[in-house]
Amino acid sequence: MRNVKLLAPSYYQKFHCIADRCRHNCCIGWEIDIDDRALTAYGALQGEIGKKICQSIEWGADGAHFRLQPNGRCTQLSDRGLCRIITALGEGYLCEICREHPRFYHTVGDTLEVGLGAACEEAARLILAEADYATLLPVGEAEVNAAAPAAFDVAARRAALFSVLGDPTLPYEVRREAVNRDFGLGAQPTPQAVCELFASLEYLEVAHRDLFLRALGEASPADRVSADARERFLAYLVYRHASPSQTLREFRTAVSLALLLEQLFARLVACCGLDAVEAARIISEELEYSEENTEAIRFTLELGAFPT
């Protein structure tokens, strides 16, 4: 094990959970797993609060989780939309998944990086509002497993991409095409292949699949969508998906994934009337938070770029 710097985008430390003001509470519709540390803490609690917490825990094949009510709400979520554990005991008693959401981590060189997933509407708002997406700031230190240095310098490749993406002298579409040409796979699957792919994915809500297919089936009037929002969402997608790349090919595939999701984002706003934050949130919730979905998209992109 070794200690490394923990870096984050400039908007990271502005994030605070908006709790009962959230329109899409992360304590609704998700099975919330409970880690061993939290289980031990809950089992040691005395009194009525400890009894209620333990009674709300179920066990399944993958371990312990909080029981969901028939309406999909976590049993620890109050009618006001607040977590009873935080209210009664403080954030220190949260299980790991609740404490960390919507954060994600990846190792780049000799640092650990953290970001905010856009499935959280407040995170999506910050991502789309921040012009300086390329600057990473130290937010602490972390302990990681020791590993041999990677041969591929992903940080330098990402910095070069952000330099092209953020060039203020060129129209956004020109910058986007340069990113695709210089950093992505170049060739893209046909529109029919993309629609077939998105129709085959798994969705939390079937209505979102229909929304995606509607957006992908229509031409996108680009002038209806903020170029700043598209640029910032694409930068977020690159940061999240391309940063863990260990090879140039992995990086190019991840950038092509980011470009495809940015295209879907633009069409959801232009053709379906979604506001930018909601479009980003739905894409992240349905696609980024499903490893099966992102891997299926990566596989299709590779086939499109390197046909057999």
Image (cartoon, grey):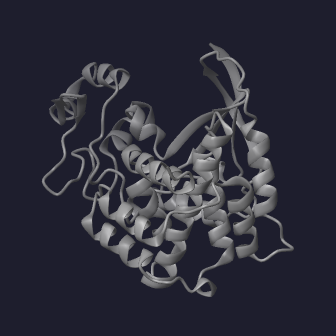
Please name whichever residue, 123 or 179, is drawn nearer the observer in this view of the structure: 179
Q: Quadrant of the N terminus?
A: top right
Q: Residue at x 44, y 46 (%)?
A: 295
Locate residue 184 relative to residue 97 in the image: left or right.
right
* Image coordinates for residue 270, horizontal then vertical, percent: 51, 83
* Image coordinates for residue 117, horizontal then vertical, percent: 51, 51
- How many numbered markers are drawn? 0
Residue 208 appears in the picture as rendered: yes
Q: Residue furthest top?
A: 1
* Image coordinates for residue 301, horizontal then vertical, percent: 51, 54
Please name whichever residue, 257 or 193, is drawn nearer the observer in this view of the structure: 193
> In the rendered image, which quarter is residue 201 located in?
bottom left
Locate residue 279 relative to residue 138 in the image: left or right.
left
Q: Residue at x 37, y 32 (%)?
A: 95
* Image coordinates for residue 268, horizontal then vertical, percent: 46, 76
Q: Residue furthest front?
A: 308
Please name whichever residue, 84 or 191, is drawn nearer the observer in this view of the structure: 191
Locate residue 39 relative to residue 114 in the image: left or right.
left
Q: Residue at x 37, y 45 (%)?
A: 292
Residue 19 appears in the picture as rendered: no
Q: Residue furthest left?
A: 70
**Relative to 26, does residue 263 appear above or below in the rendering?**
below
Please name whichever residue, 267 or 277, is drawn nearer the observer in this view of the structure: 267
